[in-house]
Amino acid sequence: MRPARGPFVAAVLVALVGWGLLALAVWQGWLGPDVDRGAGFCEASRDGFIRQPVSTWSNLGFSVAALAIGWRARHGSRMGSLTTAYVVLVAALGPASAAMHASESALGGHLDTLSMYLFAGFTAAYALSRALGLGTASFAALFVALVVACEVVAWAVGPVPVMMHAGNVAFAVLLLLTLAIENVLASRTGSPRAWGLAAVGVLVFAFVIWSQAKDGGRWCDPDSLLQGHGAWHLLGAVSAWCLYRYYDAQRDPANQFGVELT
């Protein structure tokens, strides 16, 4: 079998283009003025080119995760035709999140939250589509609907306690929905859960750090090089890698996504 280079090439391209465009956007001021959009995540804003350097560069972890997933998928993936889509989403999380921390602009903040909705929308739509035996077109429609729903919730509800804004709540709800459906699917097919449990465990640990490293949190030190929000990014990348390993170990009976088994 010839190696499938598509996912790895996609990871490389998204990483290079995404980070390149971000650097150009910050340099040219395309993202708009600094409105302290990332100020609630503890790290002190610097006067240089990058406003929050630790929270910005820690997002490179998502690029590394995407490259690792793409490299592993060269010899086939049980995600089939959606492998490249997953790789692209993981790779895009890096520069999209960095856009907020690098510029602290409103547009940078929107890019950050949109990337989160895209990722959570994908996981929930992928789980639902496999559970219901839906095809690629139905998956795409469901994916778009879930992302739009997150945007509407964030716009309509606004700030909330603990989670900061309703968009974060929508993101968490989609991940919890994904977890519930994947548990049912694994029980139905007898698929291994180890990598899925690892993904959940890492993300829960990351959330604990996220919640305690915000402004006013017990682990907040604005001038430190050890920023909890940076750890949130790096652990999120590890969780995305673990989730792919879980997907790649599933024994779903349907082949609606053009699954290539090795």
Image (spheres, helix red, strand yellow):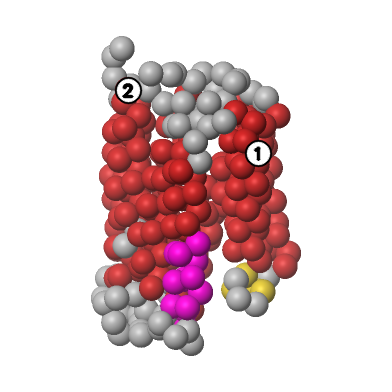
Observer-nearest residue: 259 or 150?
Answer: 259
**Residue tagged by mark 2?**
75
User: Of the residues shown, which amino acid type is indicated by label 2?
Assistant: His
Q: Is residue 70 left or right of residue 188?
A: left
Q: Residues within 10 Å of mark 1 (few under 14, many from 20)?
A: few
Secondary structure, mark 1, is helix
Q: Relative to 76, is 50 above or below? A: below
Q: Can you see residue 82? A: no
Q: Relative to 126, is 204 above or below? A: below
Q: Is residue 148 left or right of residue 257?
A: right
Residue 209 forms part of the magenta stretch: yes
Q: Is residue 108 left or right of residue 114?
A: left
Residue at 50%, 41% (x, y): give it. Answer: 193
Q: Percent x, y for residue 165?
A: 62, 70
Q: Percent x, y for residue 163?
A: 60, 71
- Residue range of the region highlighted in magenta in the rendering: 204-215
**Residue tagged by mark 1?**
184
Residue at 35%, 38% (x, y): give it. Answer: 69
Q: Can you see residue 172? A: yes
User: Of the residues shown, which amino acid type is indicated by label 1?
Assistant: Val
User: Could you tell me if the residues under marks 2 and 1 are in contact, i.e. CB atoms within 8 Å?
Assistant: no
Q: Quadrant of the C terminus?
A: top left
